[in-house]
Image (tube, helix red, strand yellow):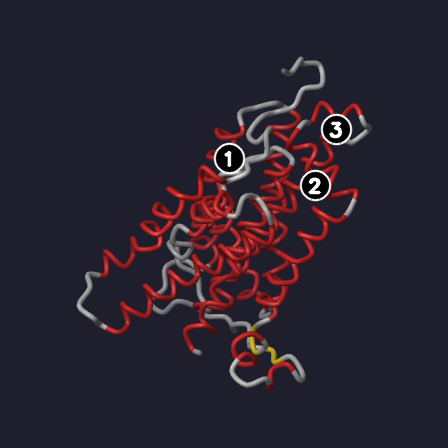
Amino acid sequence: MIFAKLVMLSIVPYVLAGQGTMLGGRTGLFNVAQEGIMLLGASVGFLGGYLTGNVWIGIALAVGVGGLAGLALAYFTTSLKMNQFVIGLAIFFFCVGLASLLYKVIIGVTLVPPLISTLPGIPVPGLSRIPLLGEIFFVQNWLVYFAIVLSAALYWLLYRTRLGLELRSVGENPKAADSLGVNTTRMRYVTAIIGGMLMALAGAYLPMVYTGTYTADMVKGRGWLAIALTFFGGWSPHLIFFGALFFAGIEVLAFRVQVGGRGIPYQFLLMLPYLATLLVMMFAFRRARVPAFLGQNYDREKRYQ
């Protein structure tokens, strides 16, 4: 039961970052700055919570800077037609540097790292009393519930609404969508901004739930794994959620084995999530349904095949 509860606790960064990647990708924007945006979200979220004494302000600030990162990606790629991969890497390096700079300027070097209050578990009335399942699923912090509701809401949006159909059409054939009156530019801007917000929130989750403090390496590759998770989930919200359970399970398993002291080198345990990712992607990548216009910039004056 403890293992399952820890898995549910650990899915949030993967779900939020994965769904943020999926949203932009569905309109053709391929964001590769997840790791940097998550780290900046962790830094800003922690600093905001520490300086104000209110974690909600920290979360709001983290979401805000994530939105700005998404806005920058949309502006340089959609308005200026610059290479998405190059801009994504530039945003990644900028966010990593800014995250460390903000922490060093505001906190400095300390012998004892400052701490903030972590988010408590919130029992769901009635459901939390269900034997076994109640403790696992219904005594979690609010961001766990948010990740579950978000995944369900995105599935409904994409596959059950006209807006979702228009959004998906931009990533498949923006020329056709444009000819039908869909504002492709606005779609890309909105999904890039919301995607950046979700990635930064995924990063802010780490100090506010896991550690109560900020460290420069706390994201630990989860942003890169979120990209693999999105391909693994076929760019579909429900499959990304179930894939996040797998990634979180591998992470918790590696941690439990390391704590258990079974004589396995910790270096092997650190690479276990990435090894599992490679093995899974070997079989899942060929079946992944990637948006046809992913990574390309749309120009209405250009002729497409």
Q: Is residue 259 above or below residue 250?
A: below
Q: Earlier in the sequence, mark 3 or mark 2?
A: 3
Where, quadrant-wise, is the C terminus in this rendering?
Answer: top right
Residue found at the very far right of the displayed protein: 181
Closer to the camera in the image, 251 or 219: 251
**Residue 145 vertical position relative to residue 19 in the rendered view, above or below:** below
Regarding residue 65, the answer to whether it shows in the image is no
Q: Nearer the viewer, mark 1 or mark 3?
A: 3
**What kind of residue is marked 3?**
Ala
Q: Which residue is mark 1?
A: 88
Q: Residue 236: percent from the left, percent from the top?
A: 59, 47
Which secondary structure lies at badge 1? helix
- What residue lies at 66% left-to-right and 26% top-to-bottom? 79
Calculate the distance from the C-alpha at mark 3 to the C-alpha at mark 2: 16 Å
| Residue type, numbered disc 1 | Gly
Q: Earlier in the sequence, mark 2 or mark 1?
A: 1
* Mark sitting on residue 99: none
Residue placed at 60% from the left, 78% from the top?
A: 122
**Kind of residue at disc 2:** Val
> Can you say whether 234 is above or below 184 in the image?
below
Residue matched to label 3: 177
Q: CA distance from mark 2 to mark 1?
A: 17 Å
User: In the drawing, what numbered circle is on residue 190?
Assistant: 2
Q: Secondary structure at mark 3?
A: helix
Rendered position, 18 above or below 112? above
Dot 1 or dot 3: first in sequence order is 1
Q: Secondary structure at mark 2?
A: helix
Mark 3 and 2 residues: CB-CB less than 8 Å, in contact? no
**Neighbour tally class for label 2: few under 14, some 14-19, many 20 plus, Cα within 10 Å:** some
